[in-house]
Amino acid sequence: MNHQVRIAVQLQPQHAEYAALRDTVVQADEMGVDIAYNWDHFYPLFGDADGMHFECWTMLASWAEVTKNIEIGALVTCNSYRNPNLLADMARTVDHASNGRLIFGIGSGWFERDYDEYGYEFGTAGDRLRNLDRDLPIIRERWAKLNPAPTRNIPILIGGGGEKVTLRIVSEHADVWHGFGDLETIKHKMSVLDEWCAKTGRNPEEIRRSTGWGKVKPENIDHADALLEAGVSEFTLGYDGTALDMPGLGEWLAWRDSKR
C-alpha cells in the first residue's frame, strides 16, 4: 500500500472550556496537522465522570468555520445516537461548512452510560453492529439524494477490530479503517481485513489503515516505522483539549515529513 503518511490529533472534548478546545484545533491547523478528531460521547471517558464535556457534531461544525486546511471528524461517531438520514444530512452540512474537509468516522457504540443517561437502548454488541450494518447504506443513499450534494465522496472511517462482523463492514463501506493494539495485533487485523476484501470484492489497497495512541509518549514514535512498514499510514495522537503546546507533536510532524 502506498498511502501518504498522515498525522492526526484527537482532541478530547472533556474537562475543558470550549474556548480552549477551539484554540487548540486552530493551533493544530496552523502547525500543519493533517486531521483533527474529537469523539462522540456525552460524558468524560476518564477523570471526573461528571466533569465538563461537549457534544461532537456541533463542535465539528464550529471547527469547520475556525480552521482552514486541516481535515476534521469524529473518532468515532456513535451510530446509535442519531437517525441515519439525519446523521447523513448533518455530515453533508459540515462537509460544506468545511469546504470538503470532513472525514465521516463511525462505529457501533460502546459507552453504556451515554445510552442510559440519554434514553437510548443499549442492547447487545451484536444488536449495535447489526444496526451499523443496516444504517451505512441508508447514510450513503441519503448523501446521493441531498441537494446540494456533498462536495466530494465523503471519506468513511470505521473504527473497531471485530473479525466476524466489523471488519466485514469495513471491507464493504470504509475508506479508512482505524484499529487498536500492538504491531502484531494490527498486522493480524489487517490480514483479516484483506481476507474480507477478497470475499466482498473490494480492493484492499483502497482502504487506508490507521491507528494511534490515547496518550503521546516518546517511545511511540520508535514503533512508527514498523507500523508504517506493515501498512499503517495514519497515526492519531491523543491530547487533552487544552494542550495548546501538544507535546511531541512537532517531532511527529517532522517524522511524517521525512517519509513523504
Image (tube, rainbow, N blue to C red):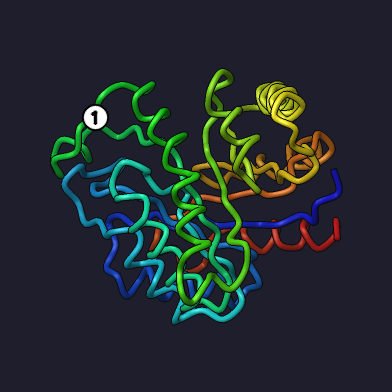
Where residue 120 appears, x then y in whole percent?
A: 19, 38
Using residue 70 as the reference point, say whether residue 192 is left or right of it.
right
Name above or below for residue 199 compared with residue 73: above
Name above or below for residue 251 compared with residue 172: below
Q: Tell me the quarter of the picture where residue 186 sits.
A: top right
Amino acid type of the residue that numbered disc 1 sits on in the rendered structure: Phe
The residue beneath circle 1 is 122
Where residue 73 appears, x then y in whole percent?
A: 49, 59
Q: Nearest the camera: 58 or 223?
A: 58
Q: Nearest the camera: 128 or 75?
A: 128
Residue drawn at the location 66% of the way across and 41% of the way down: 220
SS category of the residue bearing label 1: loop
Where residue 158 appears, x then y in whole percent?
A: 54, 42
Name above or below for residue 78 compared with residue 190: below
Using residue 165 as the reference point, say whether residue 219 is left or right of it.
right
Q: Tell me the quarter of the picture where residue 164 sits.
A: top right
Q: Nearest the camera: 165 or 37?
A: 165
